[in-house]
């Protein structure tokens, strides 16, 4: 490689350095080249400056980043000890090989402890993690690791076990799409209860629903995209509220008005 190419890396080389793909496949499997202007704009967010609008020669390139903690690491939930493989340059030098770590679980609760470098060069943690997503940082080390604590395998209902028959069936339902004479044009938990009662004699094993709740316990406002614009009141059974079907005040407080087909009466 010439001194010129080392001094002025190509866009492709810069993209490889910063982890930017220059090609992609669409939903039909066709490969596409990312437009040059898009790659330049993405590289600019990493601090790359260009000599000119039509000149792909970088004027300035940020220095190589130092070693950092891995972005993601998967561990077995409720099992200790577990280890984390690290680049030796990540951790500061300590006299006894111990390093102070800080953990924030998916509920936002913090905890702190010590980890030791083992004979295999792995950093060993003697702490059990509950299933979920947790954030790990180590004092003196750059970056943060997303710890994914998994149960090891998915739950299998007894009915799906070989001794239970191995098969099950159910319905996939979008709750707002359920219609009845008693709802206000949008399905609610009363409709869901009625659906379950009607399906049970047919031997249905499950009813799969669209997300109805916040996805993260520590961040309740981070709601499902399919329900983000709906207040949680919309899934309540309106016919079970006292005087709700005929109360103008209740209708004003709701985020919708009953359609003519679904007016109570």
Image: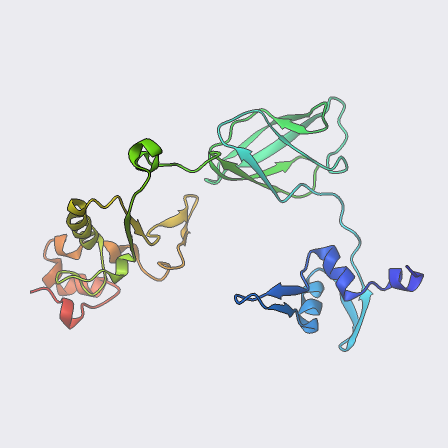
**Residue 191, how many percent across, how many down?**
19, 55
Residue 159 placement, left or right of 239: right
Rendering coords of residue 264 (x, y %): 10, 64
Q: Is residue 225 above or below residue 99?
A: below
Q: How is the image coloured?
A: rainbow
Asked which quadrant contains residue 246, the reply is: bottom left
Q: Residue at x 31, y 52 (%)?
A: 209
Left or right position of 181 against 74: left
Q: Where does the C terminus fall, quadrant-wise?
A: bottom left
Residue at 93%, 61% (x, y): give it.
3
Q: Nearer the viewer, residue 233 or 199?
A: 199
Q: Nearer the viewer, residue 205 or 151?
A: 205
Count the marks. Answer: 0
**Left or right: 39, with 150 as reference point:** right
Furthest toward the left, the residue is 265
Across and down, in percent, residue 36 comes to 70, 72
Between 97 and 11, the residue placed more toward the observer is 11
User: Which quadrant of the figure has residue 23?
Assistant: bottom right
Taking 208 as reference, is 227 above or below it?
A: below
Quadrant location of the N terminus in the rendered image: bottom right
Residue farthest toward the bottom in the current orientation of the protein: 54
Decide if residue 42 is on the left or right side of residue 207.
Answer: right
Foreground of the two, 62 or 166: 166
In the displayed structure, 27 sits above or below 68; it is below
**In x, y percent, where is residue 210?**
33, 54
**Image point (11%, 53%), residue name:** 242
Q: Residue at x 74, y 43 (%)?
A: 67
């Amino acid at each position: 490689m010439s001194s010129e190419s080392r001094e002025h890396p190509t866009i492709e080389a810069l993209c490889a350095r910063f982890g930017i793909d220059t090609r992609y496949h669409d939903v039909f499997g066709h490969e596409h080249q990312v437009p040059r202007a898009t790659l330049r704009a993405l590289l600019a967010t990493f601090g790359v400056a260009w000599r000119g609008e039509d000149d792909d020669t970088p004027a300035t390139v940020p220095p190589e980043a130092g070693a950092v903690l891995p972005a993601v690491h998967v561990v077995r939930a409720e099992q200790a000890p577990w280890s984390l493989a690290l680049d030796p340059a990540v951790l500061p030098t300590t006299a006894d090989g111990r390093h102070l770590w800080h953990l924030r679980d998916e509920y936002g609760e913090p905890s702190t402890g010590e980890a030791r470098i083992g004979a295999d060069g792995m950093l060993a943690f003697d702490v059990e993690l509950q299933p979920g997503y947790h954030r790990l940082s180590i004092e003196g080390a750059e970056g943060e690791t997303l710890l994914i604590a998994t149960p090891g395998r998915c739950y299998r209902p007894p009915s799906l076990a070989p001794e239970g028959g191995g098969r099950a069936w159910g319905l996939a339902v979008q709750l707002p799409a359920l219609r009845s004479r008693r709802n206000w044009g949008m399905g609610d938990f009363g409709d869901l209860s009625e659906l379950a009662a009607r399906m049970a004699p047919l031997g249905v094993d499950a009813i799969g629903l669209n997300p109805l709740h916040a996805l993260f316990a520590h961040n309740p406002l981070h709601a499902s995209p399919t329900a983000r614009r709906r207040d949680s009141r919309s899934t309540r059974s309106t016919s079970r509220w006292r005087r709700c079907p005929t109360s103008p005040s209740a209708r004003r407080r709701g985020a919708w008005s009953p359609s003519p087909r679904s007016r109570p009466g």
